[in-house]
Amino acid sequence: MKKKAKVLFVSQEIFPYLEETHISKTSRHLPQAIQEKGKEIRVFMPRYGNINERRHSLHEVIRLSGMNLIISDSDHPLIIKVASIQSARMQVYFIDNDDFFSRKHVLKDEKGKQFDDNDERAIFFVRGVIETIKKLGWQPDIIHCQGWFTGFMPLFIKKAFNDNPMFADTKVVFSLYEQDEFTGTLDKGVANKLVFDGITAKDVKQVADPTYINVCKLAIDNSDGIILGSENVHADLVKHAKKSGKLLLTYKNETEYIQAYNEFYDTVLEGVEELTE
């Protein structure tokens, strides 16, 4: 019997824990649909401070918490929480840390200014997901990343953890979105902070200027498949994705995307070259 494919969904936002956006809505309904199509799933997002833990019944998973991650020479405790969406028969895991996620806003402060440490928050999030998956002993066949905040995940999987048996054969898919942009840049030192076991300065030169476009280009460069999650993805990113030679799925509307994504996962796993149509 053919084993069920395992798909790990890593999203910067999921409804109903955050307000409804194109990304959060897709991140809510896609995993449920893929599970119903016979694949195993796990779902992760950050535990931002404005998420109401009581209303959504979040609770800490003690056996998964307790590790410290070093980001930019500082120790940060990793806390794992979980909640269930009963109607979907789906659990959502939350990556938490008081230094990065206790504030009552998501990626910008009350004045609309991006947090200065969004780069370190994003690094902590994706590394937290990786360490939690290792503890769970759940080997993903596909990791589907949604939102720029997940943009460093492909780099870590392909460069830092490519020799780890848990991820050696894992394929990474990255979705590009229209309204996912941030203004300005991340901290200029993010490239140095990304240098890790297996990750060299050359691997992160794309984010020497850490704009939204360049963070997404870095994700494209280290992914196996790219999905255009919106109709109007930035032209530079579409061009970069096509030039990369990676498997590319063009935009699919609400009635098409679930079946198309499910088939795309299979195509990426098979390593079959696929046209963009």
Image (cartoon, helix red, strand yellow):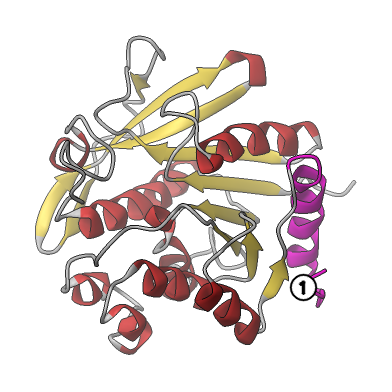
Q: Is residue 53 above or below residue 114?
A: above
Q: Which residue: 45% across, 68% down?
A: 216
Q: Is residue 105 magenta?
A: no
Q: Which residue: 18% across, 59% down?
A: 71
Q: Is residue 184 above or below residue 137?
A: below
Quadrant of the drawing holding the C terminus: bottom right
Give the residue type at disc 1: Gly
The stretch in magenta equals 254-277
Left-right relation of 162 to 63 = right
At label 1, counting other C-alpha atoms closer than 10 Å, the crowd grade (few under 14, some 14-19, many 20 or more) is few
Toward the top, the furthest residue is: 55
Q: Secondary structure at mark 1?
A: loop
Left-right relation of 275 to 210 = right
Toward the bottom, the furthest residue is: 202
Q: Which residue: 78% across, 31% down?
A: 36
- Image spot of residue 259 (x, y percent): 82, 46
Asked if residue 222 can be seen in this view, the reply is no
Name the residue tied to disc 1.
Answer: 271
Left-right relation of 160 to 105 = right
- Image spot of residue 51 (x, y percent): 32, 24
Q: Which residue: 48% across, 34% down?
A: 14
Toward the right, the furthest residue is: 1
User: Tag count in the figure?
Assistant: 1
Q: On the image, which quarter does residue 204 sit in?
A: bottom left
Asked if residue 235 can be seen in this view, the reply is yes
